[in-house]
Image (cartoon, rainbow, N blue to C red):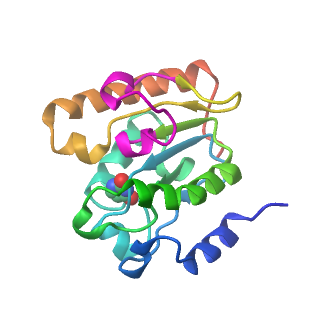
Amino acid sequence: MGLSLFELQEKLKTWDGCALHKQSNVVLGEGDLHADLMFIGEAPGKKENELGRPFVGASGKFLDDLIDSIGWNRHQVYISNVVKYRPPENRDPTTEEKNQCMPWLLMEIGIIKPKVIVPLGRHALGNFCTDVSISEVHGTAQPYTDDITIFPLYHPATALHNGGLRQTLKDDFQKLKLFLDEHGITPSS
Ligand code: URA
């Protein structure tokens, strides 16, 4: 049998494979362990680093509202990040940092076994779909494996700072809802 999420978290606390661990708390994902819907952000920010939880700052509040807008709630999905530590001053994570942290995300996906993965923004998207940009594929289902569909969306922080994208992200969430409804994907709790 593979690791449980708790065991994964414990192991991650003692891991030193990414230099960011020296200056940040570790932030693993959280939510419904049986979720069919999984959201993946870029890296924790200030608030997430303080609390050791993903998406609990301003963009997390917006993400919660967007999830509510499709009739689900935060506890019915699983939310994680590509990079498990806060990059200094919230700079973009480097390719090296993303690659170093990627095995942890893959193990989370292996445990949760979501049917739909929503990469939020280009950093998360790049781990699943290469050679496409978020502006081309946001709000559209991208086949990935037999069991998993990728449904890329803009990052809520980007949309918070760009009024035009805010409405696009809200509209894309309704497209996500349509996709979930069409495929009979409902909250498991
Ligand atoms: N932005 C992210 O990408 N992840 C978080 O957890 C918070 C903000």
Q: Looking at the image, in which quadrant does ligand 1 appear? A: bottom left
Asked if the magenta segment contains residue 108, the reply would be: no
Instruction: Name the residue rendered at 52%, 22% in the picture.
Output: 179
Q: Which residues are magenta?
A: 119-141
Viewer-nearest residue: 60 or 83:
83
Tell me where residue 37 appears, x and y as whole percent.
56, 40
Q: How many marks?
A: 0
- Which residue extends farthest top? 182
Residue at x 39%, y 24% (from the top left corner): 137
Q: Would residue 171 be seen by someone viewing this image from the given angle?
A: yes
Asked if residue 110 lies left or right of residue 25, the reply is: right
Q: Position of residue 64 (x, y in %)?
A: 38, 48
173 versus 5 height, above or below: above
Query: Can the viewer see residue 121?
Result: no
- Which residue does the image show at 70% across and 54% down from the upper left? 111
Q: In what quadrant of the picture does the N terminus appear? A: bottom right
Residue 86 position by quadrant: bottom left
Residue occupying image coordinates x 30% and y 44%? 156
Q: Main secondary structure of the magenta part?
A: loop
Q: Residue furthest right?
A: 1
Q: Quadrant of residue 87?
A: bottom left
Choose between 98 and 10: the one closer to the eye: 98
Tell me residue 170's x, y (percent). Answer: 30, 31
On screen, residue 61 above or below 125: below
Question: Horizontally, is 173 left or right of 144 in the view?
Answer: left
Q: Is residue 140 magenta?
A: yes
